[in-house]
Image (spheres, grey):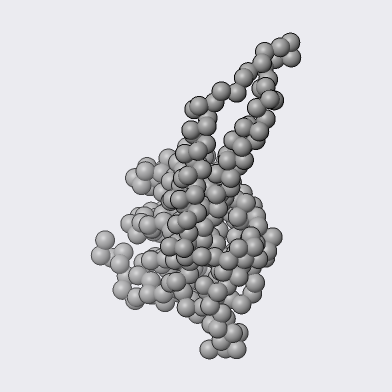
């Protein structure tokens, strides 16, 4: 282990999370069980607000300028406004803390994080984005984003936060479906532009158009150029299977594929969505490539692990021959 790795390992994920939260919103992170009083108060304020609203006797005045409220009851109106604002702020705080809870659970799975601090401006932008997110499944995704940024700062851009913030639950579900089929090559993430395969895996072009509007996909068919020879290989892979492409001759040849590409924000969100990858899809893609490109030899292998420095470690057995 190098000196940098030792320093990183000394940084506690939980401590870094707590410190980042404190710097952004001025409040130390507290476990769930210490926040029951706030939950109870939020419910109390909601009941008060509903009761006052349903029993309102504020006079309404009609005049030449339109409809207005009699200011003789200003004190009562102010009380209701105060209760409404207090309830809204407590609800926002609950949403923030639910997201932080999810981030905490994610960070419990890792041993150490980078000692590089998270940008305070990023944290403020992040909490402004999640304060109105009450859906539990969306809170989990936001929690993974926060955990990822705590672990490795600069993983998620402001642009990505804004795009996710504006997505509906249905759009997120469609992105999860599409991202389960995402393939990689040299850092590029894409889907094979094959109508038959897309139909087989229930990915409709309307979904891609929808995700293009969200800024996560490029629906224009692009050409992905791979190059291989007898001695030179190229790869297509997901987290489970790697396809190894070799040429039949010593002179390198180009293999061009039509693909739909994930944008930068789409690629970043792939790490937070946690899609259930479909291994059958990549095998079908490799078979389709073999069918249309006879000048290349393609094998598929189960991945043991992926290391940023040493690359992909995989099982030597070719699983294409057994499918």
Q: How many marks?
A: 0
Residue found farthest to the top: 64
Residue found farthest to the right: 65
Q: On screen, 308 above or below 190?
A: below
Q: On screen, 313 above or below 122?
A: below
**Viewer-nearest residue: 89 or 153:** 89
User: What residue lies at 30% left-to-right and 67% top-to-bottom?
Assistant: 319
Question: Residue 11's spot in the image, x, y percent?
Answer: 56, 79
Question: Residue 242's spot in the image, x, y percent?
Answer: 41, 67
| Residue 264 shows in the view | yes
**Viewer-nearest residue: 87 or 143:** 87
Question: Residue 86's spot in the image, x, y percent?
Answer: 58, 45
Q: Is residue 128 left or right of residue 14?
A: right
* Quadrant into which the C terminus falls: bottom left
Q: On screen, 14 above or below 135?
A: below
Which image quadrant for residue 295? Answer: bottom left
User: What residue lies at 45% left-to-right and 50% top-to-bottom?
Assistant: 40
Q: Is residue 291 left or right of residue 193?
A: left
| Residue 158 shows in the view | no
User: What residue lies at 66% left-to-right and 16% top-to-bottom?
Assistant: 61
Q: On screen, 4 above or below 78?
A: below
Question: Residue 14's spot in the image, x, y percent?
Answer: 52, 72
């Amino acid at each position: 282990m190098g000196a940098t790795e030792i320093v990183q390992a000394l940084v506690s994920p939980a401590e870094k999370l707590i410190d980042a939260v404190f710097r952004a919103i001025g409040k130390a992170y507290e476990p769930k069980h210490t926040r029951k009083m706030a939950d109870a108060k939020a419910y109390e304020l909601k009941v008060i607000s509903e009761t006052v609203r349903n029993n309102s006797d504020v006079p309404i005045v009609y005049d030449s300028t339109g409809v207005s409220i009699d200011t003789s009851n200003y004190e009562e109106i102010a009380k209701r406004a105060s209760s409404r604002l207090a309830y809204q702020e407590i609800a926002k705080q609950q949403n923030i803390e639910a997201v932080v809870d999810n981030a905490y659970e994610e960070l419990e799975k890792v041993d150490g994080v980078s000692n590089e601090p998270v940008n305070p401006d990023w944290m403020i932008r992040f909490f402004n984005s999640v304060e109105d997110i009450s859906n539990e499944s969306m809170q989990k995704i936001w929690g993974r984003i926060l955990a990822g940024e705590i672990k490795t700062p600069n993983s998620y851009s402001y642009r990505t936060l804004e795009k996710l913030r504006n997505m509906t639950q249905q759009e997120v579900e469609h992105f999860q479906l599409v991202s389960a089929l995402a393939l990689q090559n040299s850092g590029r993430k894409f889907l094979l532009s094959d109508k038959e395969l897309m139909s087989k895996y229930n990915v409709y072009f309307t979904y891609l158009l929808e995700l293009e509007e969200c800024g996560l996909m490029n629906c224009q068919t692009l050409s992905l150029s791979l190059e291989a020879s007898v001695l030179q290989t190229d790869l297509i892979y997901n987290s489970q299977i790697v396809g190894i492409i070799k040429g039949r001759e010593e002179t390198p040849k180009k293999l061009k594929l039509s693909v739909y590409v994930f944008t930068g924000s789409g690629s970043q969100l792939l790490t937070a969505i946690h899609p259930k990858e479909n291994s059958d899809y990549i095998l079908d893609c490799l078979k389709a490539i073999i069918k249309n490109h006879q000048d290349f030899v393609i094998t598929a292998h189960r991945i043991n692990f992926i290391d940023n420095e040493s690359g992909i470690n995989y099982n030597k057995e070719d699983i294409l021959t057994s499918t």
